[in-house]
Image (spheres, grey):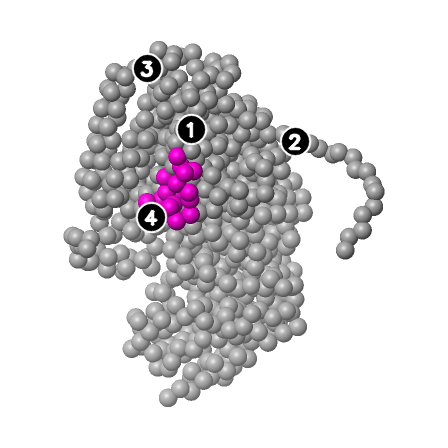
Amino acid sequence: MTEITIKTSETTEKTEKTTGITLVEAITQALAYELAHDPDVIVLGEDVGVNGGVFRATQGLQARFGEERVRDTPLAENMIAGVCVGLGAMGMKPVAEIQFMGFMYSCVDQIISHASRLRNRTRGRLSCPMVIRAPYGAGIHSPEHHSESTEAIFAHIPGLRVVIPSTPLRAYGLLLASIRDPDPVIFLEPTRMYRLGKQIVPDNGEALPIDVCFISREGNDVTLVSWGAMMHETLKAAEILAESGIEAEVIDVATIKPLDMETILKSVEKTGRCVIVHEATKTCGVGAEIAAQIAEKGLTSLLAPIQRVAAFDVIVPLYRLEDYYLPSVERIVQSVLAVMEYK
Amino acid sequence: MTSQISHTQKSIIQFEIGYTQFLDPMGKIVQNLPEFTRDSEHLKILYRFLVRTRVFDTKAIALQRTGKLGTYPSTLGQEAIGVGIGSAMQSNDVLCPYYREYGAQFWRGVKMSEILLYWGGDERGSDFSDPRVKEDFPLCVPIGSQTLHAVGVATALKLRKQARVTVTTVGDGGTSRGDFYEAVNLAGAWQLPIVFVINNNQWAISLPRAKQTHAETLAQKGIAGGIFSEQVDGNDIIAVRYAVEEAIKRARSGLGPSVIEALSYRMSDHTTADDARRYRDAAEIEKYKALDPIKRFYQYLVDQNIWDKTKEEALQESVTKEVADAVYEYEHTSPLEPTAMFDFLYAKLPDALHREREEAAQLQRITTRD
């Protein structure tokens, strides 16, 4: 397993900025690699062709691989998902882009009623290898409906995988793994991380494992569990806590469906404390599932109640208030301190 | 308040929807018949499949009424649409049906026992065993959603430059859904090898055709997508077979998609869980009985001296036996283990689910259902 710790010190960030690639560039690199190496892979979506996608994630792909394999679709998200079901059943590997997670809701019927269950309902006769990529999350001052973090909707659905990278390296390796996976994957890309920091990402076609968590930072005092863009704040919080002598273990869940509870439970067993950090609203968020499973399977190792630092249970505000809505480094630090002080 | 000014408009486009019928409700020929009707042996097979579908359908309802089958949607009165489609397709074409086109499925190789298994609550009913239908989609319950799968299939066929065609069916109700409009739109835009057949049986559960749309025909919804669109008499097997075959030929030779609205009538309730007497005048059913697709084709075959009473009796006997065998196979299919729920959830069961699977394996077997 490749392990990369994001260094938050200024010097490291500077070097990485000049030599590496961004998360969105890592996505493009993975797509290009797979298009070049697997003739069954096609990329489709709104404005993914000549325009290169609204975030430029598919930049240059149509020029390189042609209009047949990098296809602009009419503007209908449900259609894109439904067409992927047919393509997947025929053995193609469609990689669709939905421009923002907030526009995925019209695909929900095709994803839940068909993509997730085609293999099961035909007892394996047909299957649905497909990836639906969508930028997600708040923090980039987008208009309404462009800041959603509703991954729990899909994490609730049997038959799906939900994969969320947090760094350029993980974006590359996890996207390759998702495209090669024989089952449907919802691949959510944190927009806030798209151009925040760079890493050197060798274009070697090596996938990272899915269905497993990554330990991004080792520590013995408290387990911090997060994914996506909140990994940034969580790791920052860990650095600050380290200054006060609290060593946090930081877990990047990466695949939130199915959940690798083994890694999380093992860490909690070691630390006895757990704070879960997610950008999604708290109620019925994936944090609730993680907390419940820790309570079911690891209660005796807990030295303090599990805490969740999540978005407030409100509608994502328009951007003037979004910085208050998103969990901050300070909220994470405070939550950890409370857990550490619990008697 | 509106103010009107006198102005002129150029006519930009006009459209028309043609209607095709070869046999009238009495089985009389109304125009020159297509080439395939010269092969009387083939006509007999068409007739056999119509009868097969009806005998199956009647039996399925009886099974449901006696507690031996789950909720079942009947195809009574619409058999010519399914059989017409099935007979017009080549074996390596792909069918993405809704849930009433048993006639097409049987023709292509789906077993009667498989359809029974599906409505009898067992996923194995959609694991078609005949290799000819290995790529066909299973029955699709969420209305209209299969039309998009068909567009995806057609996209794959076109990308791979295969001379194959996708046929998808949808009810009249399904043409109100976004999925259908989206599918028609993309099929037109990408000029895909696909045929949409609308089984217009006049009722979307309790909503009659007139209340579903102000459009004069459902076929014209295809015009909006730039697709060749037409109506046929869906109770005339020759018309359905002919129109679908022509549409498939066009699609196969790269001339793009078609929409065919087959006009029929739902002689049954929506499903066995429905009671159409709540919303539908019994007199209406009587009126449509006269348009029965099987009676009409029978009359035609008799008039052509292709068929007679003796042959009919032999056919009924043979088909009844065939259906009885299918019911036997259905009723003697060994039950699935509880862990079967996990077998095909993913290609490989994720570690996270192993414990649940073990739990399911320990469940006490339920032997009676009440």
| Precedes in sequence: disc 2 or disc 3 | 2
Q: Amino acid at mark 2?
A: Phe
Q: Chain of mark 1?
A: B
| Precedes in sequence: disc 4 or disc 2 | 2
Q: Amino acid at mark 1?
A: Leu
Q: Which residues are magenta?
A: B268-286
- Nearest the viewer among A129 and B295 is B295
Residue picked out by circle 4:
B273
- Nearest the viewer among B81 and B310 is B310
Residue picked out by circle 1:
B291
Visible residue check, residue A114: no
How far apart are the alpha carbons under marks 4 and 2?
A: 40 Å
Residue at left offset 80%, top offset 51%: B3
Same chain for the residues under marks 3 and 1 in the image: yes
Residue at left offset 71%, top offset 33%: B13
Question: Please, which residue is most extreme toward the front here?
Answer: B283
Q: Of the numbered discs in the image, which one, if any, rests on residue B307?
A: 3
Q: Amino acid at mark 3?
A: Trp
Could you say where residue B273 lies in the image, as x and y percent from the top left? 33, 48
Relative to B88, is A90 above or below? below
Q: Of the numbered discs in the image, which one, if any, rests on residue A117?
A: none
Reply yes or no: does residue B270 show up in magenta. Answer: yes
How far apart are the alpha carbons under marks 1 and 4?
A: 25 Å
